[in-house]
Image (tube, rainbow, N blue to C red):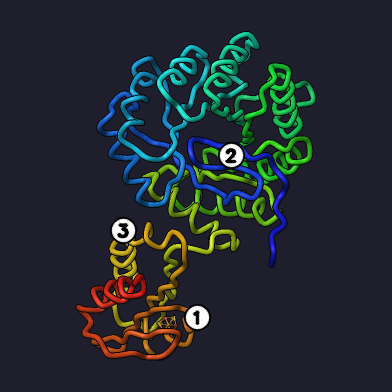
Amino acid sequence: MQIKRRKSRKIFVGNVAIGAESPVSIQSMTTTNTADVAATVRQIRKLEKAGCQIIRVAVLNEAAARAISAIKRRISIPLVADIHFDYRLALLSIENGADKIRINPGNMRNPEHVKRVVFAAKQRSIPIRIGINSGSVIRTLKNKIIDDMVAAAANSLNLFKGFGYEQIIISLKANDVLTTIEAYRRVARITDAPLHLGVTAAGLLQSGIVKSSIGIGVLLLEGIGDTIRVSLTSDPVYEVSVAQKILSAVGIRNSGIDIISCPTCGRCTINLIQLVKQAEKALLPFQEEYAARKLKVAIMGCAVNGPGEAKDADIGIAWAGAAGILFKKGRKVKNVKENELIKTLIAEVRNEMV
Ligand code: SF4
């Protein structure tokens, strides 16, 4: 199935292009105190290693805004400053080298303040994301949340246009999947600004993964969306890996190591969950090397059906009693001792790289 992507304007966030035919990029947000430069840089590097392409930090005060320049010197992905309420923090973040500003028009309502932020962004040629959240839009008497979200986006677009500024990215996140989908569909019809997709406050891992996969996945399949952020109440590294899996599942990103594993059944005699976790951790450092190509790795519970069920996998391992087998494209390559299976798998993944 070929996805026909909505035509959007191309905008650069640092060196990452968003919009038009640019690949859909993955974003995440730090959970550290931004003013703690060492901790923030540590987390950003971890996220970058996992595949995060644009990072957002919360700017709650002056110390956080000033920390941006020190953080930027020590990371290599573009940094977005997330501002609520205080336009002066946006100005200070721009001064300190932020590659993009995210503001919420629901809590920065004075057009004069917005104008000052827009002019500062314009001077440095950096984009602004108009980040609309269902919880903070101005509610009308009709109290129709989707109408209100789309109206908030339209108002901001007009305001920014009046300032002669078009480096805009839009998001319209709700914590409800269907509201989110419909709001994005409608805004996609009124602007060619690139769209940042996400379902907000999606919850813990299971709930967050389900809501984000449906919300973001449906829109991507309809060709809507230029950059994505999965929100999870969890370590943000999971946000990045879930985002990669969503892109891969809808066929947009055909690269990286895709680990498939069976649900297990009575034929499985080992602790497969533990082994898949081990393999996932061991393969994480290779994700960067596989950024431009795809490798499908299978970890299956038994050698009876495993190789057949995973015959499209480039490399696979499966268990046969106390030992295991290594297979490629469904064909057995060799027997491997159980305690050497993960080691063998990693060696094969490394071999495939050369
Ligand atoms: S691969 Fe084997 S263990 Fe896994 S579900 Fe299929 S039959 Fe069961």
Tag count in the figure? 3
Image location (x, y in percent) of residue 301: 37, 80
Q: Nearer the viewer, mark 3 or mark 2?
A: 3
- Label annotation for residue 293: none
Q: Residue at x 72, y 57 (%)?
A: 4
Q: In this view, does 3 lie to the left or right of 245?
A: right
Amino acid type, callout 1: Asp
Q: Distance between the residues labelled 3 and 2?
A: 33 Å
The foreground one among 27 and 262 is 27
Amino acid type, callout 3: Pro
**Label 3: few (<14), some or many (≥20) within 10 Å?**
few
Amino acid type, callout 2: Asn
Q: How far apart are marks 1 and 3 (CA)?
A: 23 Å
- Label annotation for residue 175: 2
Circles 1 and 3: CB atoms closer than 8 Å: no
Q: Which residue is drawn at 62% across and 35% down?
A: 171
User: Which secondary structure lies at badge 3?
Assistant: helix
Q: Earlier in the sequence, mark 2 or mark 1?
A: 2
Residue holding disc 1:
312
Q: Which residue is drawn at 36% across and 21% down?
A: 64
Q: Which of marks 1 and 3 is nearer the N terminus?
A: 3
User: Which secondary structure lies at badge 2?
Assistant: loop
Quarter-of-image position of residue 277: bottom left
Q: In this view, does 276 lie to the left or right of 203?
A: left
Circles 2 and 1: CB atoms closer than 8 Å: no
Residue holding disc 3:
285
Quarter-of-image position of residue 110: top right
Q: In this view, does 350 lie above or below 209?
A: below
Q: Distance between the residues labelled 2 and 1?
A: 37 Å
